[in-house]
Image: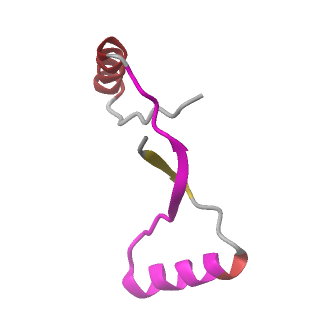
């Protein structure tokens, strides 16, 4: 099963290095790490999720429980 990504929990040194790179590039950077596996969904569940995504204007990621 494919695994999703979640926001990384960086150590202070890693966070400092990330912020330095952001400053140098003048861009925002987000750090992610592997997270919980994606959920296996039925076609009906996928349809319900897509409907809500469209209503909210977001992308939803669904992980196993």
Towards the viewer: 11 or 16: 11
Question: Residue farthest to the front?
Answer: 1
Query: Which quadrant of the structure image shows residue 16?
Result: bottom right
Q: Nearer the viewer, residue 52 or 46?
A: 46
Relative placement, left or right, of 12 versus 40 is: right
Count of picture labels? 0
Q: In the image, is residue 23 above or below residue 56?
A: below
What residue is at 58 percent from the left and 61 percent from the top?
8
- Is residue 17 shown in magenta? yes
Q: Is 13 placed left or right of 18 in the picture?
A: right
| Residue 58 locus on image (x, y percent) | 35, 35
The image quadrant that residue 29 belongs to is bottom left
Left or right of 35: which side holds 25? left
What residue occupies the far top of the structure in this picture? 44
Q: Give the residues in magenta.
A: 14-41
The foreground one among 55 and 63 is: 63
Residue at x 35%, y 17% (from the top left corner): 42
Residue 26, by quadrant, is: bottom left
Position of residue 36 in the picture relative to residue 47 (left or right)? right
Residue at 47%, 84% (x, y): give it. Answer: 21
Q: Is residue 28 above or below residue 20?
A: above
- Residue 49, percent from left and from top: 36, 21
- For residue 52: magenta? no
């Amino acid at each position: 099963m494919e695994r999703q990504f979640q926001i990384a929990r960086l150590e202070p040194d890693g966070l400092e290095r990330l912020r330095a790179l952001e400053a140098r590039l003048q861009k925002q950077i987000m750090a992610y790490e592997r997270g919980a596996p994606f959920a296996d969904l039925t076609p009906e569940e996928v349809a319900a999720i897509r409907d809500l995504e469209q209503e909210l204007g977001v992308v939803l990621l669904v992980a196993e429980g």
